[in-house]
Structure formats: structure tokens, C-alpha cells
């Protein structure tokens, strides 16, 4: 009986450790908010992003403080920390000053000369559009119900994985909708990027969403980056997102898009370029941007249509809750 009880305790502890590991896949990376104390008199609101950059050991930490009024400076520092045990130890220079501190139990504390210091706590931000229900008349391309494998019959690549959490995961090539689309009044999609801390740039959780089979909105882990047109929600070599609205990896994010397909001449050449508006996580990041195109994809056609295409760049990215309302 005692041996069985000990075995039971051991199993329970292992299960708890596995659960904790799943919930806190990376307890340091993410967003923080709190205060900046530039001196003994003033206090400002502050925020931080902690980005994992290598084997859960090395972290880049970006901290910003907003001034309380006009003609007052805030603060911006970018520093690095190394994890030892359950603590990320910070010791670095930024802004001509030396900063020291730590991240432990969800609290980030860092200090410098003359008493200036930051005190911030980790929080989890969700997209306000997560779980958005399709309106009446919408075309549901990937229905979502938590705990139920999704119906992927609207898609051409049967190799993509149907997961128990209701998502579809990239696998063995790109994936197109069977139906072709032109103008789209409202397209909704949710995606979750894996944490790949050893990768950089286009190698970090890369995919993409194409409209009319041609025009891509980039999908990439760009959390905490100075972003470009090649980063998440960017239009390659055309327009970067107006703001970096990315959430940390392993968090569900959303795109809500309005797309106007190109208008064609009688021979199928482009008369008017495509235009696109994109909201990422409820924030407008592309505003009716014109997308140039000089190819002959629609030669001899009267209308520029194509599939919704999800790109495979060999990263286990998950998609769910995909639907659209056609343009009028």
C-alpha cells in the first residue's frame, strides 16, 4: 500500500511538472507593464518586451517609458540578460549607463545610476478579435470548435494536420482553398506561431496568407523587432505594417482583411491594382494600400480571382477559425 501511495505521489508530481511546463513554456518571454522611476520625485508608465534569442538562456529586453507631459523626456533602453536557474540576470549598458537587475516570478526589475529604475510585471494580452464568429452569409473555410478536429474539406492539401485543439497545422507543402475568390469584404483568420528562439529573420516561424492566389500578407514571428516590409503583416517590398502589433509566439493572433482584387482590361492585363486593408490583433496595420502587379496571371480572363493560399516554410504554424464575406 505504501509503495502504491509513493508511486501515486510520483505520478502526480510528474503530471504537475508536465502541466506547468505546458502552461509556462517560456515564463520570461512576453510583455510587461509597470513604472519607471527616473528620480525620487517622478514616476512614469512603462512597458517592456522580453524576447528569447537562444535556447531559453539569452534574452533581449526592450523597455520604454512614456513621458507624463509635453516637454518631458521618457526613456528607452535595450539590454540583455542570461538565465541561470529560475532567474534571468541582467547586466548591460544602454543609453550610456550600466543597468543591472533580474526577471523572476513574472517580475522585471532593473536599476541604474542616481536611483533610476524600472519595476514591471508580466501580463498576457489577447487579440480582441480572437474567436470572432462568422456573420450570417459568411463562407466558413475552417470552422473552429475547441477540442474538436476541424473540417478541412474546403482545402486542397489533405496532408495538413487536423489537431484536437480545433486548429489546422502546416505540413508538407502549401494549402489552397478549393474555391476561387475576388473581392473580399471581410476575411478573418487566426494563427499561432511556435517559439523558435535559435532562428532569426525569415527563419523564425515563417508563413504567409495570399489573396487571389497572388498577394501576400506576411506571417512571421516579429515580436519585439524593429519591423520591415518583410515582417509580420508586411507587404513584401511595398509597405511594412504601420505599427508592430505582434503578440509573443505561442499566442493566438488574428488578421482581419478587406481585399479589392485587381481590375482587368479586356485582354486580362491590369487596369487597376489590388488594394488591401489589414487589421492585426484589432489594430489597423495596412490602410487601403495599393499592391502593384505586372504579371500575366489573368491573361485572357475577365476577372482576377484565385484561391486563398496558406504558405508552407517548414514551420509548425497553426491556423484556425478562417472565414470570409465576399465583396459586393
Image (tube, rainbow, N blue to C red):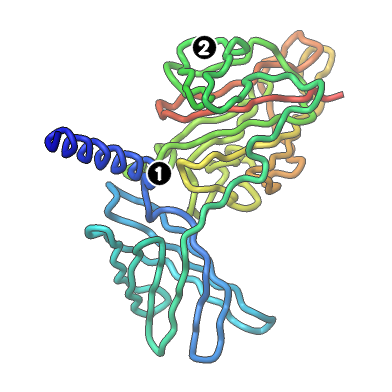
Q: Is residue 161 above or below residue 97?
A: above
Tell me the SS state at disc 2. loop
Secondary element type, mark 1: helix
Which residue does the image show at 42% across and 37% down from the upper left? 194
Foreground of the two, 237 or 41: 41
Q: Could you tell me residue 307's position as x and y percent?
A: 65, 16
Left or right: 271 in relation to 141: right
The answer to which quarter of the image holds residue 97 is bottom left
User: Residue 168, relative to residue 87: is it above or below?
Assistant: above
- Residue 326 at least partly seen: yes
The location of residue 71, given as percent across then percent down, is 66, 84
Q: Quadrant of residue 60?
A: bottom left
Residue beneath the point at 73% across and 27% down:
134
Q: Would you say residue 273 is visible in this rendering?
A: no
Drawn side of residue 34 relative to residue 299, left or right: left
Report the residue marked by disc 2: 157
- Residues 292 and 177: in front is 177
The residue indicated by pointer 1 is 23
The furthest residue to the left: 3
Amino acid at each position: 500500500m505504501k509503495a502504491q501511495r509513493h508511486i501515486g505521489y510520483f505520478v502526480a508530481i510528474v503530471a504537475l511538472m508536465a502541466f506547468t511546463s505546458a502552461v509556462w513554456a517560456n515564463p520570461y518571454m512576453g510583455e510587461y507593464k509597470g513604472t519607471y522611476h527616473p528620480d525620487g520625485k517622478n514616476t512614469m508608465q512603462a512597458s517592456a518586451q522580453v524576447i528569447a534569442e537562444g535556447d531559453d538562456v539569452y534574452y533581449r529586453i526592450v523597455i520604454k517609458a512614456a513621458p507624463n507631459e509635453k516637454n518631458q523626456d521618457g526613456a528607452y533602453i535595450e539590454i540583455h540578460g542570461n538565465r541561470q536557474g529560475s532567474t534571468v540576470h541582467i547586466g548591460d549598458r544602454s543609453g550610456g549607463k550600466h543597468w543591472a537587475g533580474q526577471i523572476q516570478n513574472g517580475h522585471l526589475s532593473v536599476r541604474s545610476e542616481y536611483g533610476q529604475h524600472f519595476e514591471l510585471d508580466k501580463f498576457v494580452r489577447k487579440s480582441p478579435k480572437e474567436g470572432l464568429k462568422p456573420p450570417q452569409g459568411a463562407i466558413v473555410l475552417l470552422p473552429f470548435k475547441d477540442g474538436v478536429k476541424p473540417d478541412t474539406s474546403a482545402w486542397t492539401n489533405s496532408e495538413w494536420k487536423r489537431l484536437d485543439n480545433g486548429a489546422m497545422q502546416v505540413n508538407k507543402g502549401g494549402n489552397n482553398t478549393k474555391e476561387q475568390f475576388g473581392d473580399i469584404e471581410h476575411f478573418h483568420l487566426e494563427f499561432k506561431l511556435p517559439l523558435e528562439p535559435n532562428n532569426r529573420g525569415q527563419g523564425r516561424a515563417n508563413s504567409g496568407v495570399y489573396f487571389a492566389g497572388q498577394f501576400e500578407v506576411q506571417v512571421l514571428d516579429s515580436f519585439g523587432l524593429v519591423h520591415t516590409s518583410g515582417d509580420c503583416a508586411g507587404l513584401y517590398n511595398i509597405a511594412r505594417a504601420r505599427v508592430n502589433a505582434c503578440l509573443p509566439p505561442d499566442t493566438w493572433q488574428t488578421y482581419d482583411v478587406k481585399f479589392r482584387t485587381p481590375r482587368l482590361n479586356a485582354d486580362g492585363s491590369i487596369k487597376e491594382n489590388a488594394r488591401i486593408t489589414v487589421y492585426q490583433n484589432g489594430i489597423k496595420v495596412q490602410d487601403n494600400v495599393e499592391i502593384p502587379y505586372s504579371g500575366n496571371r489573368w491573361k485572357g480572363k475577365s476577372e482576377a480571382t484565385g484561391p486563398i493560399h496558406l504558405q508552407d516554410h517548414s514551420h509548425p504554424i497553426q491556423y484556425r477559425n478562417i472565414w470570409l464575406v465576399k465583396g459586393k
